[in-house]
């Protein structure tokens, strides 16, 4: 049973009844016992009737208090759930920030290694170029020496008359 909101605020207090009577007033007001019983029971009924809206209002307030208590419990539960979710997300954010910092550190280390590797590659390329140049110089020197040797062998063979054995007779004693 629910009482509309406007009725809750419009409940009138029960009428005041004065029970302070002089000794002769009950006789004047209630000349006989039957009337007195009717009047007393009527007074009791009017008090009961006046209490009925109060009881209804009290019941409605009790229902409303129970609803508020249930809503408060639900709000508390939702607040606890949100707090737990917030803590979980904050932990996730902190973990992601830690992973990001580690990734940045790793990337910086890899950049340093890449720079060192590029330096080593440039040094190796310069060495390879120098070695190629030296190889070309040595090949040219070898070709020149081979040419000189061939000229010497021809000159020596022309002087002795026999190819391949220069100065063979002069070495014997």
Image (cartoon, helix red, strand yellow):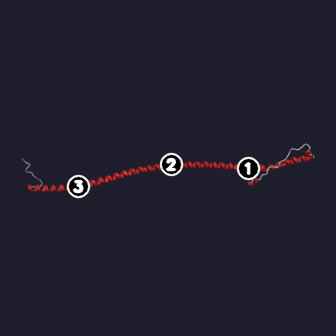
User: Which numbered disc covers residue 120?
Assistant: none
Report helix, strand or loop for mark 1: helix
Report the disc number at residue 61. Answer: 1
Q: Which of marks 3 and 1 is nearer the N terminus?
A: 1
Real-space Cα separation, disc 3 to disc 1, in angstroms? 110 Å
Q: Is mark 2 on a helix, strand or loop?
A: helix
Residue lying at the far top of the rendered structure: 23
Q: Residue at x 61, y 49 (%)?
A: 79
Locate residue 85, reporting x and y percent.
Answer: 57, 49
Say the numbered circle drawn on residue 137: 3
Asked if residue 4 shows in the view, the reply is no
Query: At 39% from the left edge and 50% from the top edge, which residue is drawn?
Result: 112
* Residue 112 seen: yes
Q: Nearer the viewer, residue 7 or 161?
A: 7
In the figure, is residue 52 to the left or right of 65? Answer: right
Percent position (x, y) of residue 94?
51, 48
Find out whether the residues at labels 2 and 1 contact each other: C-beta distance under 8 Å. no
Along the polypeptide, which appears first: circle 2 or circle 3? 2
Q: How far apart, in angstroms, are the residues tagged by discs 2 and 1?
A: 50 Å
CA neighbours of label 2 inside 10 A, class few (<14), some (14 to 19), many (20+): few
159 vs 128, nearest the viewer: 128
Rendered image: mark on residue 95: 2
Tell me where residue 77 appears, x and y as whole percent: 63, 48
């Amino acid at each position: 049973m629910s009482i509309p909101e406007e009725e809750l605020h419009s409940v009138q207090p029960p009428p005041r009844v004065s029970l302070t009577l002089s000794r002769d007033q009950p006789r004047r007001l209630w000349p006989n016992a039957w009337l007195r019983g009717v009047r007393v029971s009527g007074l009791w009924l009017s008090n009961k009737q006046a209490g009925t809206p109060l009881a209804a209002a009290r019941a409605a307030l009790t229902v409303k208090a129970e609803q508020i208590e249930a809503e408060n419990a639900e709000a508390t539960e939702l607040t606890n759930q949100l707090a737990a979710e917030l803590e979980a997300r904050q932990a996730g954010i902190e973990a992601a920030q830690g992973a990001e910092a580690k990734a940045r550190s790793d990337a910086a280390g890899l950049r340093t290694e890449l720079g060192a590797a590029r330096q080593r590659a440039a040094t190796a390329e310069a060495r390879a170029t120098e070695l190629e140049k030296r190889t070309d110089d040595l090949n040219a020197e070898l070709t020149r020496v081979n040419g000189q040797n061939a000229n010497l062998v021809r000159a020596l063979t022309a002087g002795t008359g026999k190819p391949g054995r220069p100065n063979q007779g002069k070495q014997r004693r």
